[in-house]
Amino acid sequence: MKKVGIVMGSDSDLPVIQKTTDTLKSLEIPFEVHVYSAHRTPEQAKDFASNARENGFGVLIAAAGMAAHLAGAIAANTTLPVIGIPCKGGAMDGLDALLSTVQMPSGIPVATVALNGGANAALLAAQILAVDDKSLAEKLDAKRAADAAKVLEKDKDILSRL
Ligand code: RP5
């Protein structure tokens, strides 16, 4: 199976990425994690993205906060699918990161998940890899069914709590 490449702009983004790695582990998807910044270590971020396909990655995930150019900078240097996670924090509490990540110019797409959406980034990466991986698609179907069962359990209990 292709690996998921995860890049965060700072180790202060780790709590968000932890949700990503936990979800990937639960689906037995191999991954690699790096701290590269679009601003502080632009060369390393570029090299990682440029070499990602030949290094066995199938999808890249980039998480950053504030002036969050990381996902866009990664996407500029690869045609692998790139998922951006805007991180909360800073003076605007993530609105700046959300807009910086999602508002990409035509030609360089970044699939942006919600603020701090680490788990959904992992699931979207899994769904991309599952396009031609039947066993992974079955795991995703099973997770959906288990999640739905949990909601139905809560539906059964809700009246008793009111
Ligand atoms: C961004 O700036 C990082 O992704 C992080 O979310 C934010 C703050 O970084 P630190 O000052 O905590 O290293 O580039």
Image (spheres, rainbow, N blue to C red):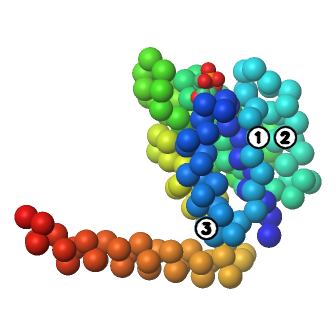
Reading the image, the residue beneath label 3 is 26
**Image-quadrant location for residue 31:** bottom right
Q: Earlier in the sequence, mark 3 or mark 1?
A: 3
**Numbered-mark total:** 3
SS at mark 2 in the image: helix
Up-down relation of residue 150 to residue 31 (above or below): below
In the image, what residue occupies the spot 28% across and 77% down?
Answer: 152
What is the CA distance from the residue labelled 2 to the residue labelled 3? 25 Å
Could you tell me residue 104's position as x and y percent? 60, 35
Task: Tell me if I can see residue 99 in this picture.
Answer: no
Could you tell me residue 24's position as x and y percent? 64, 61
Could you tell me residue 54's position as x and y percent? 92, 54
Queried on whether the Cβ of the residue with tag 2 lies below 8 angstroms from ligand 1, the answer reads: no
Q: Which of 66 and 79 is in front in this view?
A: 66
* Quadrant where the C terminus is found in the figure: bottom left
Q: Earlier in the sequence, mark 2 or mark 1?
A: 1
